Amino acid sequence: MNSALWTHLAKDLRIEWRSLDAIISMLFFSGLVVVLFSIAFDPRGAFSQQIAGGVLCVATMFASVSALNQAWAREIRHQVMDAQRMVPSPGSELLLAKVIVNFLFVTIVQILLAPFFVVFYNLHIAGQGWLLLLVLPLGTWALVSNGVFFAALSMSSRNRELLLSLILFPIFIPALLAMVQATTSIFTGESDPSLWIKMLLGYDIIFTTISLLLFDVVLHVD
Amino acid sequence: MKKLASGLYVVVTIALMIWGFYQAVYVAPLDAMQGEISRIFYYHVPNAMLCFLFFAISLIGSIGYLSYRNKLPSRAQAADALALAGAEVGVLYCTVVLTTGPLWGRRAWGIWWTWDARLTTTLVLWLIYVSYLLMRRFAAGPQVQTLAAVLGIFGALDVPIVYMSNRWWRTQHPAPVFGGGPDSGIKDPAMLAAWEWNILAWLVWGVLILALRYRLERQHQKIADAEAQAALNA
Amino acid sequence: MSPGAILDHQFTVAAYIITWTLHLVYLVWLTFKWRAQKRLEARLNGNSR
């Protein structure tokens, strides 16, 4: 059962490694977003620590969307989807592989951007910094797992990219809230993020489960 | 016989709406503290309660479509029409809520908006179902119905999560408590009567436009089928 | 009437008008769509005769 998952995973990682398309575009785009936010919301002000969490999460969101828009790009070209449908393993493995791959991309971008973010916002973490290693991956997983699923949903429509953002963002709102609240409370050290971390975990479990369950429906649609 | 029944239903609906209006504007006494803007409640609250009903109907339609699409395709088509009609009427009622609410809030609380659990949930609910309708418009081809049904389920699943997350958000950073709102118990029987008449009126009105939208969609499905047949036969 | 009460009245009227406008515009849109579809249906039925 695991071999199909690994095959999909290895394939996507190998293709990306050769061209680095997704990572480069994401890196540049999210770097731009961080700079733009720094100009729009002055990071030297007293409230910079309060908004840094929100800026980080929104930058992650925009960066992820640029990756998600191309998540299924290779499958759409050359009718690869038909070949995928004929694979004997369940469609959920294809989905899970794609989610993991995109999750890795976004995480790599987050890690590469982190030093710049710390510098621009003169970030000093007042709370338990190690919790960020929990919060950011959970929040990113929420975004990416729903995003890849909805990218597959919107594959057949004419405004594919626009539709993806339109249907992803409203559903993502509670996870965004949790992620921002958790990161802000870690940065400022003012409150306890554990409630939000639990909420993110719950959100991830619920939506990952339901997207794995429903993916075969989406895959085998015309 | 059927035409007579539906004609009668329309007449009763219109009569109820007029009666509800009369009750709300002329019969119900003014609230002691709020004054005239309390009359907004007689439209705002029924629309708020009923929008959830229509979204629930939409969810049932989505689930029904996914369940029946392989075994009983005709029933699946009906379910899909119901899903679409429910979503549209729900968005309509939700839009009314989101526009009349701030009008009331501006006069009663002095602010147009606040990010408490109820308002945020209503806004996100609106966003989710508008995105559902946009998806149905943008996506092409015969698979629209399946994809829309899946999105409908996702969206409906998100709503309780949004509500809970916003409750927690607000208990962490307590905002001024804006009272229990209009459903904290209406004691005056005249106010209660006005309120009940309006709920009934908006319910029958909603069911009427839901039925009309459903019929419209079924007709659209038949036409699409006929066009496909014509293309095959040509 | 106090200026507050006048504003209250205006806001109430605005709320009622908005509610009715939204609902009736939707109903009108439904009617237009219905008529357009009826014409389309008639044309299709005419062709297949």
Image (cartoon, rainbow, N blue to C red):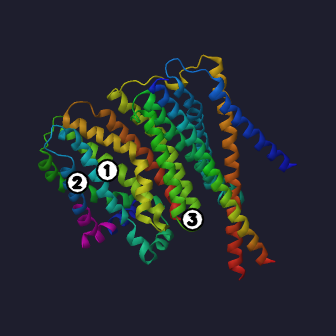
Q: Which residue corresponds to mark 2?
A: A110
Name the subunit of mark 3: B
**Residue B120 position by quadrant:** top left
3 and 1 marks in contact (CB < 8 Å): no
Q: CA distance from mark 2 to mark 1?
A: 10 Å
Question: Residue A140's mark?
Answer: 1
Amino acid type at circle 2 is Gln
- The front one of A33 and B37 is B37
Amino acid type at circle 1 is Thr
Residue B174 spot, x, y in % from top left: 34, 26
- Describe the element under mark 2 as helix, strand or loop: helix
Label 2 or label 1, whichever comes before in sequence order = 2
Residue A114 spot, x, y in % from top left: 17, 51
Q: CA distance from mark 3 to mark 2?
A: 36 Å
2 and 1 marks in contact (CB < 8 Å): yes
* Same chain shared by disc 3 and disc 2: no
Tell whether position B39 is magenta.
Answer: no
Q: Which residues are magenta?
A: A12-27
Residue most extreme to the front: C1
- The front one of B141 and B16 is B16
Assign the magenta stretch its main secondary structure: helix
Residue A105 appears left or right of B6: left
Q: Which residue corresponds to mark 3?
A: B143
Q: CA distance from mark 3 to mark 1?
A: 29 Å
Above or below residue A123? Residue A6 is below
Residue B203 appears left or right of A70: right
Residue A142 spot, x, y in % from top left: 37, 49
